[in-house]
Image: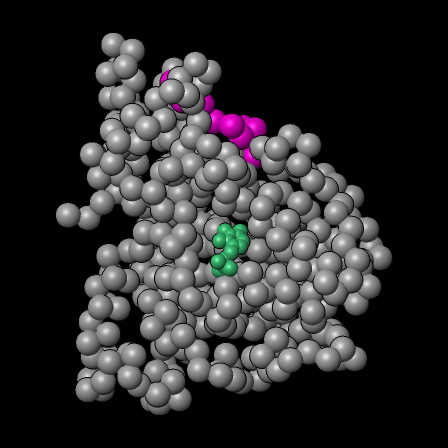
Amino acid sequence: MRKHIFNAGPCKLSDPCLENTSKAILELGNSGQSIMEVSHRSKDFLPVMEEAQALLKEILNVPDNYHVLYLGGGASTQFAMLAMNFLKSKAAYVDTGSWSSKAIKEAQIFGKVEVIASSKDKNYTYYPKGFAIPTDCDYLHITSNNTIRGTEIFEDIDSPIPLIADMSSDILSRKIDVSKYAMIYGGAQKNMGPSGVTFVIISDDFMKSAITDRPIPTMFKYPIHVENDSMYNTPPCVNIFALRETLKWVKSLGGVEAMEQLAIKRSNMLYQEMERNSMFTSPVAPDSRSRMNVPFVWSEGNEQYQDQFMKFSTERNIVGIKGHRSVGGFRASIYNAATIEDMEALVKCMQDFEKQIKG
Ligand SMILES: *Cc1c(COP(=O)(O)O)cnc(C)c1O
């Protein structure tokens, strides 16, 4: 029996993605070979890569002067690669939690970082807004959704300098204006597919502004990957196949507009239950609450039920809700593949638990 999966990443994937990828592992089309066995330069695999790129462009309405790359190394490699290629003297970063802190740390290897806004003062429980953006920085980096803290920004900000966003955990969950960004990147394992593949959407102008007078190893140069269509080295073929299946599935359901409506509906179910339920509360400021990662912690005086609720929910086939150690309590990660039934199961579990304890 399939469980109610609320894992933070890797996470739940759609049934068509799992079914079609399983089939391709046994045989890719009529090739007589597994997707794990075919050459990445063969006529069997090339259309997979091409369609994965074309579908992302279509679904996100990516302008023509942008490139879509599928690379290895995860979002964490992009933290360094971005700065290695574009941080000439100083870059602006918004600090909204663990992932942005890690991006900042990597950037500091290559230049100065100016943290222009931070929510550290309130333990990262809100998303800073209305901050001034200095024009003397090479770029501005933001983390659009904070997977651990459960805060999210729902607008595409206007930036006078190239805007870069780590959208690992909210890509494909709302309509975005790609033209406002110089680069968008993330690990695929939260909304776009399995782990092991990283997406990068980069404007041609921004790519061409990459630093040329710094020694950069070949694998860490964006233009190399653009010139070679993400095939400078062997790409993660199986992962890209599963990513393509995920994109097909998103498109078949109505694209990002449909995903956004579902995300609002799913997350509201949980936020409303937190309002109603006397035992749980949200640690996040109301205007910053993520639709993708929803932490729920004990209201005062109920902390002692942590293990008991964990057991209670596990018995109901709910997995992945243990909170991150930096926040405590619980966190439901409700990415695109999460269903209303998954949400109903979780909400019912919280209701039944309250009844059992409080009568
Ligand atoms: C998971 C995550 C990362 C790290 O991704 P990897 O692919 O594991 O390197 C970075 N940023 C955000 C916002 C994340 O959620």
- Image coordinates of residue 286 in percent, x first then y, are 54, 28
Residue at the spot x=48%, y=51% of the render?
169
Extreme left residue here? 1
Figure check: 307 above or below 184 = above
**Residue 322 shows in the view:** yes
**Residue 268 shows in the view:** no
Is 2 left, or right, of 12 in this rendering?
A: left
Is 289 left, or right, of 89 in this rendering?
A: left
Quadrant including the C terminus: top left
Of residues 132 and 174, which is closer to you in this image? 132
Q: Which residues are magenta?
A: 279-288
Figure check: 330 above or below 139 = above
Residue at the spot x=38%, y=71% of the render?
240
- Image coordinates of residue 232 in percent, x first then y, are 52, 84
Residue at the spot x=38%, y=55% of the render?
10
The answer to which image quadrant residue 221 occupies is bottom right
Figure check: 127 above or below 248 = above
- Image coordinates of residue 106 in percent, x first then y, are 66, 60
The answer to which image quadrant residue 103 occupies is bottom right
